Structure formats: C-alpha cells, structure tokens
Amino acid sequence: MGNLPSDTLSFNGNGIKSTPSHQPNPPLSTFSPNPALHTDQHNKVYIRDSPLPTPKETDCVIHVLCNGICGSDLHLWKSGGIGDLRVTHPYCLGHEGAGRIVWVGSRVTHLRLGDRVAIEPGVPCHECDQCGTGEYNLCPEVRFSGVPPHDGSMRRYHVHPGRYLHRIPEELSWADAALLEPLSVVMHALERSPVRLGEPVFVAGAGPIGLACAAAARASGATPLVITDVDEARLEFARRFVPGVRTVLVPLGEAPEQVAERVRRAFEGAGSPVPRVSFECTGVASSVATCVHTTARGGEVMVIGVGRSVMDGLPFMVASMAEVDLKFINRYHHSWPYAIRLMQAGYVDLKPLVTHRFRLEQAVEAIETSADRSLGSVKVHVDDEDFGVPGS
C-alpha cells in the first residue's frame, strides 16, 4: 500500500484537504486537569490525573471525545498484560480514540486547530527494515498507545504524532471515528485473506471483532456467512447486525470436531460448499481447532484473535494433510484512509455495535460493564463531548 504516512502532506490519505493553521496555540497549561482511566500492576482500575507530556514540534494535542473499550484493555487490567507485555506500573489505557485537535506542533503542516481526527495508535521507529518496506505494523520498536509502558487515549487530552492522526469527514460521528480502529483490524485481515464475490465465509466468535469481520466480509461480497459463539445473546445480536448471517451456538466443552460438523451442515443448508477462508476472532485454542476442521482443503484460517502466548491442542496433522494454512495479523498498516472511505460511503456501519455509553468520569463503570458479560454489552464507548476547550 505504499510508504509510511507523511507528516507534510496537504491531503491526509482520505482525500480530506486541510490547510496549515495560523491560529496561535493555547498555552499547554490550558489542558489541565486531565482525567484518565488507569490500571496498574495490582489489577486495579481507577481515574486519576494524567499530566500532559510536553508535545514535540511534530505532535498534536487532541481533546479525545470518544474512546472504545477493547478486549485487550480488559486483558491488561484483569491479567496484568498480554504475552510479554506486562503492566509493571500505573498507566493509562485506551487505543480506540477520536477527537478534536486543540494544539498543533510547528512542523505539522497538514492539520490545524479544530480538525476532527481519528487516532492511529501505533507509532513505529521509521528506521527499521519493516518500516522501510511500509509494513510499519511489524516494527519491533513500535510505540502503541494503551499498551504498556505507553499511555493510551482514555483521557481528556492526548499527545500524538501528527502523521498518525487521520482527518474524518463531518458525515462520520465521533462514535464512527472511534470504531475505525477495530475496522482497520478486520480490513487488514481481509487484505491478507481476501474474500471472493459469492464465496462462503466462516467467522468464529461474535464479539466486536467477529461482528465487524462478518460485516466487512459481507461488504466484500461473501455469502453465505456463518458465525459461532458460546453466547446465544451474541448470536441473536449477530442476526440483527449482519442480515442473512447463519448462527451456530457452541456449547461449552463441545469438541472442535463436533462444532465443525455443525458449522459445515449450516453451510450445506444454505446450498454452499464449506468455506475456503475462516476467520478466528476469539483467541481460544479450541476455536482455532474448529476453524481448521471446518475449512475446505487447500483453504486458510486467518487468526485475528490471539489470547495466549502458547496454544496447545491444535490439529496440526489435520491442517497438514488438508494443506489448510494458518495465517495471522499484527494490527494493521495503511488501513485508516480506506476504513474512513468505507464508512463514509455507507458500506460498513459499525455504530450498532455500541450498546453502552459512559462519560469520561464514569470510565471505571464503563470498563467494568465491558468485562461483565451478564450486562449484555458488545462495544462500550466513553465520551467527553460536552467539555469545552479552546479550539473545540
């Protein structure tokens, strides 16, 4: 998709033109207090002030108006980390943010005060081989907002490099803009495992990523679609959210081979062969195994959700004999302008995923709601829309 995003372009990749601002920046002391949702090494969550770091001349300060809570936020809080990334001290969560620019660095030429932007949370080094080839998501030195030790965007004001801020059109709401991050995840998965028009697709897991994946696959022309989950309420939501999707409930403890047989029958009932491409969106080993058993010979399983550093019980002999490829993604690169245009054109509308909304001051209640499956949340958003600041 080309090289790294530029910090000197007059167009921000999605065709939305901006001219450099000649308005003076407000003093940085304006951006205080700065309430933020924190977790720590003791698995606590709480709101406390987050002093604003001094922005560089290539940075902007964003008044974050909407943030989504992701499953990784829950892992970092509840489990104290993801893989080798451990929470060792208090820090601010959040990486699905959008807001309005309230301070612009002197070397940022494509953005101005008051611009509405979505925050691409990963900031690479710009020097390694992966950055040089444009696959900056694979940069070993990437600084990803909300992943320890880097503070995230679940706070009122957030400092971020201008080249990783994407202007959003007025047609998109703040909720839309905060959903661009999960949409970018599934778009990268679909880029690595493309779906052909009229091709059957299996999605394992009806959480936010699985539902977004099903919606994006449908927009790509996939049919029929089958989605699984252990929660009937999630499947009922999926049937409303993705027209025509077929659902299969997975009883806890059922063997992957048995689940796969019922998924295959769902495709047969739709007059379809078994899928060439399956998308695994749970991070659970048994679900990966189900995908392997479901997928057609010569097909591929795109693993989007990875919940553990090591997974046991995967049917490698089955995958080997059937030449079913296991593929993976690490977030995304260059996806954001495409995601913005996709939303703007109406091909994908993820707003129905947002079942609960809270004010920033209620962020602890928000993340607790997201963690409690009995409350029926799908995607929880934290808003700060009515707090007036210069440039907003």
Image (cartoon, grey):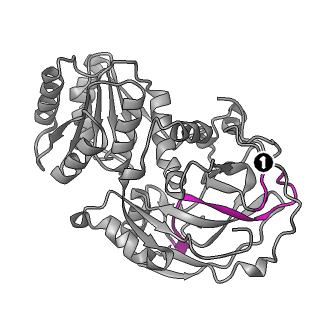
* Residue at the spot of label 1: 18
Q: Is residue 294 left or right of residue 175?
A: left
Residue 308 seen by the camera: no
Nearer to us in this view, 14 or 132: 14
Q: Is residue 135 left or right of residue 198?
A: right
Q: Residues within 10 Å of mark 1 (few under 14, many from 20)?
A: some
Q: Position of residue 292 (x, y in %)?
A: 26, 29
Name the residue at 50% across, 81% down.
Answer: 47
Identify the image quadrant of residue 326.
Answer: top left
What residue type is disc 1 on? Ser
Nearer to us in this view, 313 or 98: 98
Name the residue at 14% across, 44% down.
Answer: 250
Identify the image quadrant of residue 198.
Answer: top left
Q: Is residue 248 left or right of residue 92?
A: left
Q: Position of residue 124 (x, y in %)?
A: 67, 48
Image quadrant containing the C terminus = bottom right
- Residue 126, above or below 259: below
Residue 48 seen by the camera: yes
- Residue 254, above or below 323: below
Which residues lie in the magenta part?
Answer: 88-113
Nearer to us in this view, 361 or 176: 176
Image quadrant containing the N terminus = top right
- Residue 268, above or below 336: above
Identify the image quadrant of residue 316.
Answer: top left
Q: Secondary structure at mark 1?
A: loop
Q: Position of residue 374 (x, y in %)?
A: 21, 66
Asked if the magenta segment contains residue 186, the reply would be no
Name the residue at 16% across, 37% down.
Answer: 256
Q: Position of residue 333 (x, y in %)?
A: 60, 39
- Residue 324, above or below 205: above
